[in-house]
Amino acid sequence: MAHKKNWMAQLQKLEGAVIERTNPHNEVLRSPSPSVNFVFGNGWGLPFGYTAIISGPPKGGKSVLCNAFIGQLHKDYPDAIAVKYNTELREKAQLTAKMAEAYGIDMDRYQAYDTNQPDMIFDKIRDDIGAMCADGAPIKLIVIDSVNAIQGRRSMNADTVMTQQIGDLAATMKDGLKLILPTQRRYGIAVLLTAHVTAEMDPMEQRKGKTMKMSAGNGIQHFAEFFLWAEPNRSKDGRSTILGEELIDESKTDLMNKAERTGHKIRVRMENSSMGPSGRTGEFTMDYHLGVTHQEEEVFLLGVNRGVIGHPNNLRYEFGDKYWTGKEATVTAIKDDSELAEEILKALRRQDLEKS
């Protein structure tokens, strides 16, 4: 009988062959907000090695979310390093030492760069950061805030702003992202991008109530796997806790005798995803001095809405062998018992991870 060649063995020797398969959702970049993590589905976070882009109106919470992810990374991984390219050159103003502490960011494992030159971003990621990762550097997150403020290559070389450079930024971003992709995948680096918005001109979308859309070229949209929309909750509920307490400091007022606001809620929606569910919405409370707070409210709402916390009648709530009478008692119990909160979250995450 003639010897049969092992064609599969030969194919597997070729460069780039995928041999082992693991679930990318088993290890993810989380935020301190349970409901933001929930919108990703599967492993409840951004899988390392992949990309999420956060868009939304000005001052809507995009940079807040990026900093929150960095802080949680440092809590979850005691040696992890995060790198941020602040292309709007606002790093010193946006992240003071006090705010870094509120987010939980370890400044000894965080390096920011104020630059909007594409070569100082993409070339450095491919060459310098890639070399450091090859040498063992635990760089697990890169943030680019924002993609819109990066200079196009032709614009950098123009003598005057009066020279139009149509498509310059889109082409620069497309090539830059392709440049860093092998480094990102090889070393399992999560990438967070933020994008500005532009007016929605499609009449069909306008009829649906959409007045804004993400301002990003097709190259960026093809590159990312997760598309988040962040905006303030401007309703009355967005200015108070689930128990009706206003997010204000009544001991301080302005000249119109209005109490000083201490925080507000930010709503986050998964607009689209190629690796998880689309359409899920989360909401977290941003305290201007303490960072992300009131997570017990998110745990409560997720638990009830997803059926993990039983709600057999108008008053009773139950989880396992525990039960409470009324919303306030249940929320307070979750706030006071971190182990209870984590057990509820584990049950919630299990629902999604088992499907991935």
Image: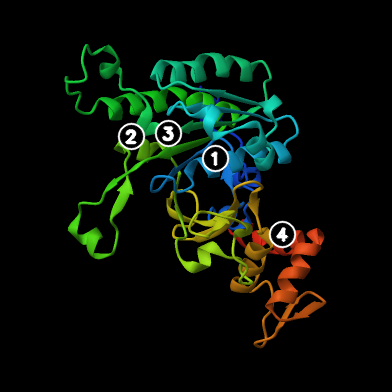
Q: Secondary structure at mark 2?
A: helix
Indicate the amino acid at tag 1.
Answer: Cys
Give the image quarter of residue 312. Answer: bottom right
Mark 2 → mark 1, Cα distance in angstroms: 22 Å
Residue sitting nearer the eye, 263 or 251: 251
Q: Earlier in the sequence, mark 3 or mark 4?
A: 3
What count of labels does the image hold?
4
Mark 3 → mark 2, Cα distance in angstroms: 15 Å
Q: Residue beneath label 2, please? A: 219
For mark 1, does the 10 Å Cα neighbourhood hold few (<14), some (14 to 19), or many (20 or more) residues? Answer: many
Residue sitting nearer the eye, 280 or 72: 72
For mark 2, does the 10 Å Cα neighbourhood hold few (<14), some (14 to 19), or many (20 or more) residues? Answer: some
Question: Which percent across, then down, holds residue 302?
Answer: 61, 66
Q: Residue beneath label 1, please? A: 66
Q: Kindly identify the residue that appears in the image at 59 percent across and 27 percent down.
A: 187
Query: As displayed, is residue 125 above or below residue 74?
Result: above
Indicate the amino acid at tag 4.
Answer: Lys
Q: Nearer the viewer, mark 2 or mark 1?
A: 1
Question: Which percent across, then down, holds residue 271?
Answer: 41, 54
Q: Residue beneath label 4, please? A: 346
Q: Residue beneath label 3, please? A: 146
Q: Earlier in the sequence, mark 3 or mark 2?
A: 3
Q: Kindly identify the residue that appears in the image at 51 percent across and 14 percent down.
A: 127
Assign the N terminus to one quadrant of the image. Answer: top right
